[in-house]
Amino acid sequence: MSSMLQDSQLTDESEVVWLEDPEDLDYVRQALDKVPTRKGKPRYSRDGRLIGYTNLHPGAASDPDSGLFARRAFFLLPHDRDKEPQGPYSVGAPGEAVDPRTIEPGKVGAKTLRSQKGRTAEIAAASG
């Protein structure tokens, strides 16, 4: 599914579950995945690691054609900034990346100075 999510696609979310502390991360990638359940840890089949996911309200409807539920997964790939600080995202971030501190149920999350340029840039901006 598209990496550019809209809040209107997330109206059935009830909570965000973090598997790692999001305060330690400049950004997470987010994707809307189709899964067979409304809640619980979804199966993860990407490279990298699952950082978190959303659970849906008990009454959330499944897709009428597939019977699957659209839920967000938050993840990082092996070449992302947390593991390769001097790698391809030492400055900048993937299109689907947002600051995990801005994520809430039903809200896409935002790109911030920290997510785009790193914690060092955020600290420098705050002190300057």
Image: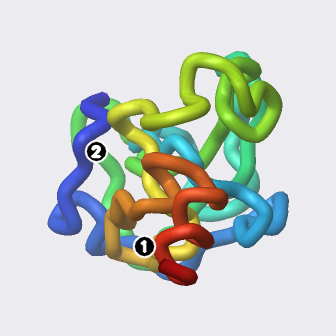
Q: Is residue 84 above or below residue 50?
A: above
Residue positioned 31% across, 35% down in the render: 3
Image quarter for residue 49? top right
For mark 1, give the secondary structure.
strand
Residue 58 appears in the picture as rendered: no
For mark 2, give the secondary structure.
loop
Viewer-proximal residue among 58 and 106: 106
Give residue 63's mark: 2
| Left or right side of 127 for 51 | right
Please name the amino acid that badge 2 sits on: Asp
| Left or right side of 22 for 5 | left
- The residue at which mark 1 appears reads as 13
Q: Foreground mark, 2 or 1?
A: 1
Image quarter for residue 45? top right
Q: How many labels sit on residues?
A: 2
| Left or right side of 3 for 48 | right
Locate residue 82, reporting x and y percent: 76, 40
Q: Are marks 2 and 1 in contact (CB under 8 Å)?
A: no
